[in-house]
Amino acid sequence: MSLRTLLFLAAALFVALLAGCTASGPPLVAVADNKTLKAISYDPSSGSLLKVTQGGVFRARDAAATWVPLPLRGPLPLSGLSQVAVSWKNPEALIASGDGAGVYLSSDGGQNWTAINSGLPSKQVGAVTAHTYKAGTLYAWLEDKSVHKTEDGGGSWKRMDDGPPVSKVLALAHSTLPGSMNTGWLYAASPEGLYLSMDCF
Amino acid sequence: MGRLPVTTQVNTITVDPASPERVYVAGPAGVFRSDDAGQTWQAANGGLGDVEIVALSLDPARQGRVFAGAADSRIFESLDGGTTWGPWAR
């Protein structure tokens, strides 16, 4: 290819790019990726399923319905989330989190979201879960290998424990299994197996 | 935290709030159910094939109704505590 041809192609490319930049049209929108599943949570108040993918948080009312992205009102990021949980005690309360994204709470079924990271040492949140019957009590495992608890819906967090001796916690779950010295137990799923601790640590 | 007799990778866990002894886990080895809070486990993969499940959830009002999500976003549903599974979503 000659130098003249190369210059011609470069000029044509420049003109094309310039035309694209100045053309009027609809604003660019992110195409939500509803694949690459990270987490699901059943919402008993509506009989729907929630899922987190690389493209955000989605809800499907039933198996025949389409996945509808939840509105991104508030600071909820479009990507970077890896967990979603419905509070059994208050199904209108949804919790979402992600490594680097922090923890978010919606009190209206996912219409509006608030960041609830006050007291957490970082936003490197690997896993969250809600207490089985205490509304407002949430647990979070952070990538610095620590477990944190809030009893006021994320108004303030308190470090509870180092958590299990594992490389990463992939999921947490609260249980009301008898025998705890407090209100129940906390399961932690990890690449190295499954761990169980009283929820008072 | 105490380690339960599960030493392979566990991607996800869900606990039945109505019967807290019943626990479901999933990982590369499949889906498993425990009815004694994790002390013993039984495979709960009927109909799933070799799909790796990365997410689990359940219906707290209907014991035995469990949902499982694969990484490619396929959703499966069981109505018998994981004994048999079928597709939930399209």
Image (spheres, coloured by chain):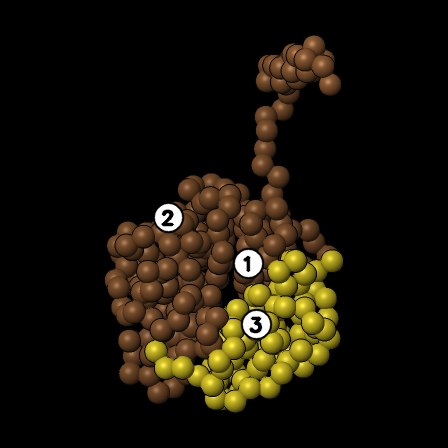
Chain colours: A brown, B yellow
Q: Is residue B25 above or below residue A138?
A: below
Q: Is residue B35 above or below residue A9?
A: below
Label 2: chain? A
Q: Mark number for residue A115?
A: 2
Comparing marks 2 and 1, which lies closer to the viewer? Answer: 1
Residue displayed at 61% across by 68% down: B53
Q: Position of residue A56 (x, y in %)?
A: 54, 48
Q: Mark number for residue B9?
A: none
| Residue identified by numbered label 3 | B27
Residue displayed at 41% across by 78% down: A195
The three-letter amino acid code for the residue at tag 1 is Lys
Label 3: chain? B
Q: Quadrant of the C terminus of chain B?
A: bottom right
| Residue identified by numbered label 1 | A38
Residue neighbourhood size for the residue with mark 1, other residues' Cα within 10 Å, grouped as few (<14), some (14–19), many (≥20): many
Q: Position of residue A80 (x, y in %)?
A: 48, 49
Residue displayed at 70% across by 64% down: B88
